[in-house]
Image: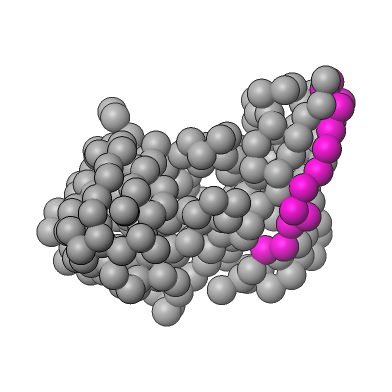
Amino acid sequence: NAGVTQTPKFQVLKTGQSMTLQCAQDMNHEYMSWYRQDPGMGLRLIHYSVGAGITDQGEVPNGYNVSRSTTEDFPLRLLSAAPSQTSVYFCASFPAVSGNTIYFGEGSWLTVV
Amino acid sequence: DAKTTQPPSMDCAEGRAANLPCNHSTISGNEYVYWYRQIHSQGPQYIIHGLKNNETNEMASLIITEDRKSSTLILPHATLRDTAVYYCIVRALVGGGSNYKLTFGKGTLLTVNP
């Protein structure tokens, strides 16, 4: 049981490049989310999914796409990277039942130059 | 969504109890209160959660007021390794049914001093 796995852990992109941050969980959780965290700030929700085939926007969705083709995977795509997307990204998953623990990945550090 | 309010920072002496408050005055009856902490930009770590009763585990205790509008996380004997940002989170219900999303506040930076 690996929990929530994020890759890559570190990435440097040039402005305008595209890339995908991967997130996978092996706990059969229905819900998965992506957050970004900027220096000195809390976590802000980018996109979330309540099950395979269902996604929705969070607070700061612009510049990001997601898909949920399987229960296990929830990739986050940066279509055309901008310096404002330099941040630490966290993926989270949790089961649908109330009161269950939320699991976070260890983070992906992205720098856009 | 129910919002949470926490003090931006607190200090605590090593070995003493750390009491971290959280206000969630708009919490709904079926929403849980979760506490997480984040040490130096690592992934947030689960501490404890509760609905209405006080809870205790090996890491901490959670005291929820009877009206559920506020709660306090208690670290009974704080150590230097407990220095972290502590987040109080309400598990929000969105759009009815069983849809949920998490709403994070800005957290409290707890500094444990020797």
Is residue B9 one of those drawn in magenta? yes
Residue at position x 48%, y 53% in the image: A37
Instruction: Specify the quadrant of the image occupied by residue A108.
Output: top left
Looking at the rendered structure, the number of numbered marks drawn on it comes to 0
Scheme of colours in the image: one colour
Can residue A93 be seen in this snapshot? no
Residue at position x 20%, y 63% in the image: A16
Please say if B12 is above or below A72.
Answer: above
Residue extent of the magenta highlight: B4-17
Q: Nearer the viewer, residue A71 or B19?
A: B19
Q: Position of residue B57 (x, y in %)?
A: 65, 30
Please say if B114 is above or below A9.
Answer: above
Left or right: A52, with B19 as reference point: left
Q: Nearer the viewer, residue A101 or A89?
A: A89
Point out the image quarter for the C terminus of chain B: top right
Q: Position of residue B87 (x, y in %)?
A: 62, 49
Instruction: Specify the quadrant of the image occupied by residue B73.
Output: top right
Can residue A109 be seen in this snapshot? yes
Left or right: A106, with A16 as reference point: right
Is residue A59 one of those drawn in magenta? no
Q: Residue furthest bottom?
A: B95
Instruction: Specify the quadrant of the image occupied by residue A61.
Output: bottom left
Q: Position of residue B108 (x, y in %)?
A: 71, 48
Residue at position x 35%, y 60% in the image: A83
Residue at position x 57%, y 34% in the image: B39
Point out the image quarter for the N terminus of chain B: bottom right
Left or right: A38, with A2 as reference point: right
Q: Main secondary structure of the magenta part?
A: loop
Please say if B33 is above or below A5.
Answer: below
Q: Position of residue A98 (x, y in %)?
A: 48, 56
